[in-house]
Image: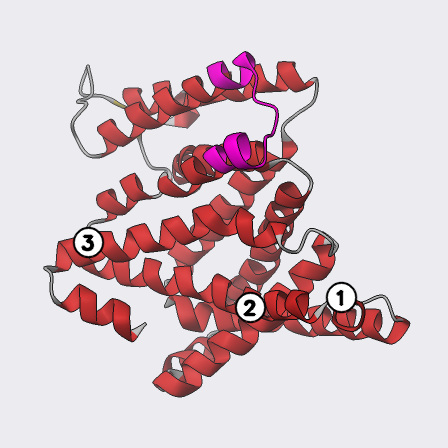
């Protein structure tokens, strides 16, 4: 992190924020390449290692940075603690779905999920926080829905991977907004609640002689242990980015990750990408452009009216 800090200190805060934010989303976008190295390991076992090693890495960070005070304050709040623990299960489901998608040949569908995610966040904001929905934002939601319905007709099934990724990450973000806890302390507690389950699962596999640690090459073992670092690093960069630049700018940057995913799915992993896929993604891309432009005030409300979903 020191090298990144030294580079960031030479430039102004906003540029540093873009630098950190871009780094986070580029790392998230490149994750499929990492998971492909573990293609021979079942998705549920990869998840168990990711949870365990993430807990180890972020706990070390807390120890080295003296972040125990924030952590202990969070433990004293029972309501907040319950929400944090629920985050642990939700993000674990999100991680498992993503790992499964990558190693089962659904990288393109996974990218769709993260394109849809900002619009699901808007929908949650309207339904949970009673936020008003502008006409442009409503238009964006309808266009995205049309894109999902189109791909559903193409598949002959609901794109559950995309919807599950979008839904779980939006729910995770919703809870994080409510509890307002720094990323490091949050991840320690989130992984702590599921870490014992993950560790028991790893131990049971190793005792039965089917676990990756005892049967896979040493390279694979190192890659599994590295899941903690590749989980924690982009979260740290994202947190720094949020501190130094505007939330709107981070909103623009978040589309880097699914775009990299999509390009990897098409050009590296050679997944099937039909004309229907392209049309469906076009609906979603147009929806995101409209949503983003309206969110930063470039697109003005045509009638100066905000719509409450309850009135529809």
Front residue of this view, candidates 224 and 132: 224
Q: Which residue is mark 2?
A: 226
Q: Which residues are magenta?
A: 262-279
Q: Is residue 190 above or below residue 35?
A: below
User: Dot 2 surroundings within 10 Å: few (below 14), some, or many (20 or more)?
Assistant: some
> SS at mark 1?
loop
Q: Residue 219 in the image: x percent, y percent? A: 64, 67
Q: Which residue is mark 3?
A: 245
Instruction: Reply yes or no: does residue 151 show up in magenta.
Output: no
Q: CA distance from mark 1 to mark 3?
A: 43 Å
Q: Quadrant of the C terminus?
A: top left
How would you rate the neighbour count of disc 1 (Cα within 10 Å): few for under 14, some for 14-19, many for 20 or more? few
For the N terminus, the quadrant is bottom left
In the picture of the structure, the residue carrying the numbered disc 1 is: 216
* Mark sitting earlier along the chain (2/3): 2
Ranked by sequence position, the earlier of labels 1 and 3 is 1
Which residue occupies the extreme right position in the image? 208
Residue 269, magenta (yes or no): yes
Q: How far from the left and from the top, in percent, is residue 202? A: 75, 70
Do the CB atoms of the residues marked 1 and 3 lie less than 8 Å apart?
no
Residue 94 can be seen in this image: yes
Above or below: residue 98 compared with residue 198: above
Q: Quadrant of residue 258?
A: top left
SS under mark 2:
loop
Is residue 78 something one can see in this rendering? Answer: no
Q: Position of residue 174 (x, y in %)?
A: 44, 50
Q: Separation of disc 2 and disc 3 at Cα? A: 29 Å
């Amino acid at each position: 992190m020191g090298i990144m800090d030294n580079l960031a200190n030479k430039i102004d805060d906003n540029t540093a924020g873009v630098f950190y934010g871009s780094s986070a989303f580029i790392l998230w976008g490149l994750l499929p390449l990492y998971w492909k190295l573990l293609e021979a390991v079942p998705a549920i076992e990869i998840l168990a290692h990711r949870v365990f090693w993430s807990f180890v890495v972020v706990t070390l960070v807390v120890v080295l940075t003296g972040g125990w005070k924030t952590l202990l304050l969070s433990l004293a709040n029972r309501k907040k603690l319950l929400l944090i623990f629920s985050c642990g299960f939700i993000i674990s489901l999100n991680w498992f779905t993503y790992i499964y998608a990558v190693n089962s040949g659904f990288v393109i569908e996974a990218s769709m999920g993260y394109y849809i995610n900002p619009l699901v966040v808007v929908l949650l904001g309207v339904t949970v926080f009673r936020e008003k929905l502008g006409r442009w934002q409503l238009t964006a939601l309808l266009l995205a829905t049309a894109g999902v319905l189109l791909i559903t007709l193409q598949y002959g099934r609901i794109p559950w991977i995309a919807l599950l990724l979008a839904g779980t990450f939006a729910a995770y973000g919703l809870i994080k907004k409510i509890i307002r806890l720094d990323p490091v302390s949050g991840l320690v507690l989130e992984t702590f609640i599921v870490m014992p389950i993950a560790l028991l699962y790893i131990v049971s596999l190793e005792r039965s002689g089917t676990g990756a640690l005892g049967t896979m090459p040493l390279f694979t073992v190192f890659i599994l242990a590295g899941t903690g670092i590749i989980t924690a690093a982009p979260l740290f960069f994202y947190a720094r980015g949020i501190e130094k630049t505007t939330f709107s700018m981070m909103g623009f940057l978040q589309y880097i990750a699914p775009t990299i995913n999509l390009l990897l799915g098409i050009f590296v992993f050679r997944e099937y990408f039909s004309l229907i896929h392209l049309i469906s993604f076009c609906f979603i891309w147009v929806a995101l452009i409209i949503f983003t432009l309206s969110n930063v005030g470039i697109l003005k409300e045509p009638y100066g009216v905000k719509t409450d979903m309850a009135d529809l």
